[in-house]
Image: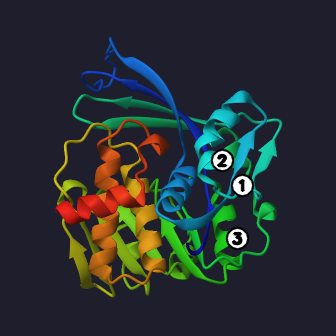
Amino acid sequence: MTERILVVGSVNLDFVAAAAKLPAPGETVTGAKLTSHPGGKGANQALAARRLGAEVGLQACVGLDAMAEEALALLRADGVDLSRLHVDPQAPTGVALIAVSADGENQIVVAPGANDRLLPEHIEAIDASVLLMQLEVPIPTVVRAAEKAKGLVILNLAPAIDVPQSLLQRADVLIVNEGEAQAYGASLDGLGALIVTTLGERGARMVKGGRLVAEAPAPKITAVDTTGAGDAFVGAFTVALLERRTGGEALAFACAAGALAATRAGAQTSMPRRSEVEALLRGA
């Protein structure tokens, strides 16, 4: 096992409609197939890291409803520590409505529900080696957790929303996709953090102080559903850092995990295991 990771983040139940194409604004697309899967960026990344061998805890908030049990099922099955989980009896478990096209692209609308009830006062001492966070819970909660962290702070700036500059300065690692990198723009300049940018089928790169530190290509795959691929990357990159892999090795490991996730439907259901990632890397 690697050292312990604490994820502070969201839990959702994803309702996925797989259709031939994504609708344009105002358009109705019919003939879709509906499925439900556990999701939420926090839960996805926690499960990704756990399946790759890390000891992982998740601090999150769900509702007192049947959706919570379905949303937490895979986390429980794989042994993610849920002892910090909060249950809010007045809010529903978060839901994501996802449309997926035949070529694997998606559109996502999230109703946060209980995720918005994870409050700063819920955050107590954080003694994990790594604190991993995203932006699907209230920003004051994210800030509080960063202040409490004693170890490495990794922040996935997704979705792209306004955050205090102090939070960006506290992070040791910032992870963005190309759209998020563009949205944050100059606010990422001059930071001391490692900035990791995912580039989809072109792989990923790592920059520090404006200097390219490492880059890695993405394995060639046939995408089925890109939902969760970014979260698989983040979870895998976090594990690779804990294992003290070099920058290029960490990026390659994370790119392989993200690529494998894109070959399967759903978010948490697509998270790969270590043996699969290593096999893909050997093949590449």
- Amino acid type at circle 3 is Arg
> In the rendered image, which quarter contains the N terminus?
bottom right
Q: Quadrant of residue 3?
A: bottom right
User: Residue at (49%, 79%) from the top-left corner?
Assistant: 242
How would you rate the neighbour count of disc 1 (Cα within 10 Å): few for under 14, some for 14-19, many for 20 or more? some
Question: Mark 3 and mark 1: span between their CA atoms?
Answer: 20 Å
- Which residue lies at the image location 34% right of the left edge and 19% below the top edge? 26
Q: Which mark is residue 272?
A: none
- Name which quarter of the figure residue 132 lies in: bottom right
Distance of label 2 from label 1 (alpha carbons): 8 Å
Disc 2 marks a residue whose amino acid type is Arg
Q: Give whichever of discs 3 and 1 has the lower sequence position.
A: 1
From the viewer's perspective, is residue 39 above or below residue 282?
above
Q: Is residue 267 visible?
A: yes
The amino acid pointed to by label 1 is Leu
- SS category of the residue bearing label 3: helix
- Residue drawn at x 82%, y 35% is 90
Residue bearing mark 1: 82
Q: Is residue 181 visible?
A: no
Mark 3 Cα shell of 10 Å, populated few (<14), some (14-19), many (≥20): some
In this figure, which residue is indicated by the disc labeled 3? 144
Instruction: Identify the residue under disc 2.
Output: 76
**Answer yes or no: do the residues labelled 2 and 1 have beta carbons within 8 Å?**
yes
Q: Nearer the viewer, mark 3 or mark 1?
A: 1
Determine whether the residue tagged by mark 2 lies in a helix, strand or loop: helix
